[in-house]
Amino acid sequence: MALWLSISETFYRCFVNEDRYLLLLSGIGVTIKVSLLAVVIGIFIGFFIALCNLSKNKTLNVIGKIYTDVIRGTPSVTQLMIIYFVVFATINWSKWIIAAIAFGINSGAYVSEIIRAGILSIDKGQTEAGRSLGLTAKQTMLYIVVPQAVKNIFPAMGNEFITLIKETAIVGYVGLMDIQKAGDFIKSATYEAFMPLVGTAIIYFVLIKLLTLALGKYEKHLRKSEVR
């Protein structure tokens, strides 16, 4: 009984007192906004870089490889701080947009490799069939190869999105109040470490679990037409 009262008092002090739960709700919104925009940016950049890496044009090939090597070879927190404090230092944009751009650029390197692997997994005969029907190389890629590759890369893309949500926990370095930063603020205000940390962990777990279920359901929808 005493233990339950202690837990209840700690919970009240951390989340209810002074409406501190609102910080977490606001943090959830920031995390979701940054993650969604970063995913969109990452897909666009990733698709372009994947085509560069697959291109026979040496210049495009070099650009793709340099981008992939640099982004994958440096910490995401360093990239975030360079983009926020250097690249966008004089541009008056919302912090969450700049953070999303940073994470999108980072994600693009990993997405490009996922897309490249997915395109290479499609049998070469599919391309030859498209060209024999009179389609150009671009049309064959867009209308035949890419739609088939999407099914193959979808699970890996889902994992990248999940990883991206967890990586956004570092946005506090540029002053954004996301889930993790809200938990840190509550911890500092109440001098309680256990409850705020467990609370933020549970929120991340629930978000990722819901996303995993949604992605799994959509993947089944994509594969409905497949005969097993």
Image: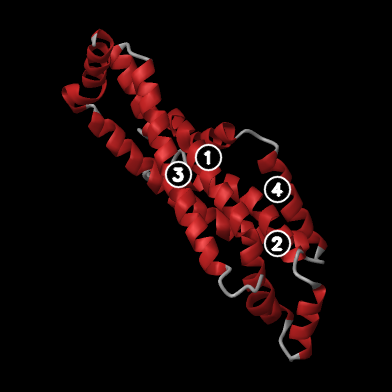
Q: Position of residue 200 (x, y in %)?
A: 38, 29
Q: Amino acid at mark 2?
A: Gly
Task: Give the number of the mark in front: 4 or 3.
Answer: 3
Ranked by sequence position, the earlier of labels 2 and 1 is 1
Q: Which residue is mark 3?
A: 209
Secondary structure of the residue carrying tag 3 is helix
Q: Amino acid at mark 1?
A: Ile
Q: Which residue is mark 2?
A: 118
The residue under the point 44% across, 51% down is 36
**Res. 130 mark:** none
User: In the image, is residue 228 above or below residue 65?
Assistant: below
Q: Disc 1 to disc 4, how far (Cα)?
A: 17 Å
Ranked by sequence position, the earlier of labels 1 and 4 is 4
Q: Position of residue 121 (x, y in %)?
A: 76, 64
Q: Amino acid at mark 3?
A: Lys
Q: Amino acid at mark 4?
A: Thr
**Res. 83 mark:** 1
Task: Give the number of the mark in front: 3 or 1.
Answer: 3
Task: Give the number of the mark in front: 1 or 4.
Answer: 4
Q: Disc 2 to disc 3, how far (Cα)?
A: 25 Å
Nearest the eye: 105 or 182: 182
Task: Give the number of the mark in front: 2 or 3.
Answer: 3
Q: Position of residue 150 (x, y in %)?
A: 62, 66
